Image (tube, helix red, strand yellow):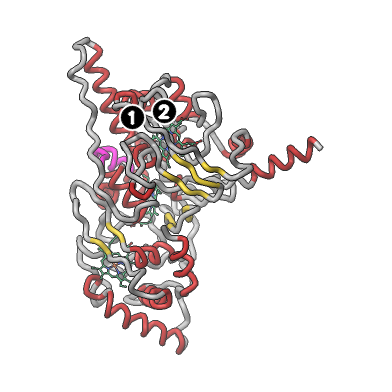
Amino acid sequence: MKRTVIASLAGAAISLAIWLAPEGRSSIHARPSQALMAPVVEEQADTAAQPALAGLVSRGAYLARAGNCMGCHTARAGDGAAGRPYAGGHILATSIGTFVTPNITPDTETGIGGWSEEDFWQALNAGKSRNGAPLYPAFPYTDYTKVTREDANAIFAYLQSLPPVVQHNAPNRIDFPFNFRPLLYIWRALYFTQGVYRPASGESDEWNRGAYLVQGLGHCNACHTTRNPLGASQGNVLGGGQIMGSNWYAPSLTSFQEVSTADWTIPEIMRLLKTGLSSRAVTTGPMASVISDSLQHLTDADARAMAVYLKSLPPGAPYSRGAAPALTEEVDKQLRRGGEIYETHCLDCHGNFGQGQPGVYPALAGNRGITLASPINAIRSILNGGYAPVTASNPRPYGMPPFAQILPDEEIALVLSYIRNAWGNRGSMVTAVQVDRSRKGAQ
Ligand code: HEC
Ligand code: HEC
Ligand code: HEC
């Protein structure tokens, strides 16, 4: 009897499909990022400790940006109503239920005002709440565990310097049996490796800084790695994966067929990280939010360090792009129809030869984001439209109009099959069923 209980609890833990819902998924439209000033501290008592505290707080503000804490801990229009920064209430939908992020402003009743530095360290490094309860890995502590104590203290000092906001957030709505928190002990035993980043000897300081940021605060792995049904990363680190519970695929950062940057120059990678634009690609969707909210604020030194590390990632296993179709008469007919739809609806912006217009409309020819084996991102772009990230250097990016109301599933499938196979692109045909699935799942 006891054994069956244990077995079924273990079974439930085994199917504990948790993942890190992307912070940006609820809004595909870029929104102007809120200016988050380092709080003013000079008005306070002029003790010798003040400059040190001000320095700590502004360092913490910077690090909180690098970790995009605000992205998840702030409610936005899609959550019902926009809320105050860091007061929580952002909704993360997952297949085990819905998380409502907590208030991490220093309000004592509804936020983390009563927390000590040590309590905060336990959350970031060990994934435990103040009362010792294990936290769900929808909070990416599996990555944040790599953050040093010094940096964690700075983030804490910054959060404690914010104006306290009284905001009660709705509780998580997690399905039975996953709402039984102690199951997380089993999950943690299987999948959580606690520990601060340890610099690799033999690598430069710059490389180690980049690795620290990418693997830790940047939590790139939270989206860019395949997760097993337990919500734990598997396969190649940064090897690409569908963001579970969403219609976005975060491509492999190690595969040349996907979005490896190993053959890019360092300035090109830095530009992509800070603006979302490059001569080869435009970022969109959740990645655009990551850039608007977080990466654009990195110092050049940190963006360069990240670029050095990303460029050095060893190539992962090659990915299949999805077989390009054999040119049967039927396929030829479909591609022709796709070409006609392209001429009517897309050519004005994306050009006769899919060449786009530099800095304004992305090229579709040679665009790796379009020929990915999984067409879900491209389907999503065509259905919902989108924007490149809003950044200081590109405050009003050009937009792609949504076609969900203009073109039926079949025509979206045809035009997408066409752009996946025109101008030297090669990719599998897309079906109306795939578009329909995305339309139903898209929010
Ligand atoms: C991908 C979304 C996401 C990001 C990014 C994120 N958090 Fe969270 N955080 C959550 C969720 C969800 C929870 C609640 C988890 C639970 O209920 O077990 C949480 C919980 C917490 C808690 C525990 C609060 C409590 O009352 O127990 C703290 C502290 C916290 N986060 C701080 C941070 C900091 C600091 C950062 C940035 C370095 C950050 N979070 C980034 C989603 C996120
Ligand atoms: C919230 C989920 C999420 C996080 C966190 C995230 N990414 Fe992404 N990323 C995506 C998605 C989805 C795409 C595909 C859409 C696109 O190409 O813009 C993407 C695309 C990319 C691309 C290809 C851009 C292009 O257009 O060629 C690069 C490079 C990249 N991410 C790097 C990173 C790095 C580095 C980090 C960590 C600092 C990171 N990402 C964190 C979701 C995420
Ligand atoms: C008014 C100009 C305009 C029209 C018309 C237009 N697009 Fe776009 N398109 C854009 C812009 C701007 C972007 C970049 C937006 C972004 O990053 O989200 C874009 C992005 C895309 C992307 C994503 C590219 C990437 O690198 O991630 C695809 C796919 C795409 N368009 C296909 C189409 C198709 C197919 C049509 C016709 C049905 C079309 N577009 C019509 C302006 C346009």
Q: Regarding mark 1 in the picture, which secondary structure is present there?
A: loop
List the single residue furthest toward the right: 1
Residue 202 in the image: above or below residue 228:
above
Taking the spot 29% from the left edge, 38% from the top edge, the residue there is 302
Residue underneath mark 1: 165
Residue 69 placement (x, y as % from top left): 37, 37
Name the kind of residue labelled 2 in the image: Thr
In the figure, residue 339 lies in which quadrant?
A: bottom left
Which dot marks residue 110? 2
Taking the spot 34% from the left edge, 38% from the top edge, the residue there is 70
In the image: residue 225, left or right of residue 386 = right
Q: Residues within 10 Å of mark 1 (few under 14, many from 20)?
A: many
In the image: residue 181, left or right of residue 139 = right
Q: Was residue 303 drawn as part of the magenta stretch in this picture? A: yes
Residue 96 seen from this side: yes
Judging depth in this view, the residue of 43 and 282 nearest the camera is 43
In the figure, residue 307 lies in which quadrant?
A: top left
Name the kind of residue labelled 1 in the image: Val
Q: Which residues are magenta?
A: 297-306
Judging depth in this view, the residue of 71 and 239 nearest the camera is 71
Residue 425 placement (x, y as % from top left): 36, 73
Q: Was residue 343 drawn as part of the magenta stretch in this picture? A: no
Taking the spot 50% from the left edge, 53% from the top edge, the residue there is 244
Residue 410 placement (x, y as % from top left): 43, 77
Residue 300 placement (x, y as % from top left): 24, 40
Decide whether the magenta segment is chiefly helix, strand or loop: helix
Quarter of the image containing the C terminus? bottom left
Residues at discs 1 and 2 in contact (Cβ within 8 Å): yes
